[in-house]
Amino acid sequence: MPGGSQYQGPAEALELYTAAVNAIDSEVKGAKNPYTSRNGHMFSFLDKAGSMAIRLSDNLREQVTETYDGAPVMQYGSVMRGYVSITPELLENTEQTATWLSRSYEWIGTVPPK
């Protein structure tokens, strides 16, 4: 079953997210809650509202925040440490989003496997 097959959020957001993930030769996992992972660590996801979050090092997260007006990610009333939100405008730019996903993929590869 392909990732996002039961996703109930905006179809356009899922299409854009999937395109960016495919551009880095990764795969979307999770039927209802689309996400990517490496070595047991999630490094991006798409929430029910169609907002994308990406996990980055402190320096890279700061760059996204400053360059693209990224913001901390809130889930269930708590800030998700290490994640930054991707603006809808950035998500629409598959090439740029894929660049940041690739950086996230490389960075998460330095974290010991779960």
Image (cartoon, helix red, strand yellow):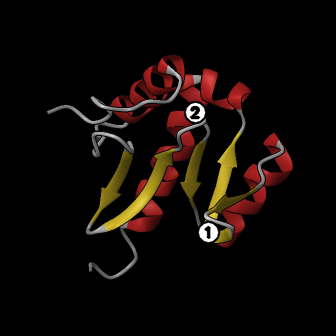
In depth, the one of 36 and 32 nearer the eye is 32
Give the residue displayed 73% in from the left and 50% down from the top. Answer: 64
Does dot 2 land on a helix, a strand or a loop? loop
On screen, 37 above or below 90?
below
On screen, 45 above or below 98?
below
Q: Residue 111: x and y, percent?
A: 39, 78
| Left or right: residue 44 compared with residue 65 | left
Q: Residue furthest top?
A: 12
Q: How many marks?
A: 2
Residue 112: name its quadrant: bottom left
Give the residue displayed 14% in from the left and 33% down from the top. Answer: 1
Q: Residue 114: x and y, percent?
A: 26, 80
Residue identified by numbered label 2: 50
Label 1: how many residues lie within 10 Å, few (<14), some (14-19) or many (20+)?
Answer: some
In depth, the one of 90 and 5 nearer the eye is 5
In depth, the one of 92 and 106 nearer the eye is 92
**Residue type, mark 2 in image:** Gly
Residue identified by numbered label 1: 80
Q: Residue 106: x and y, percent?
A: 42, 59
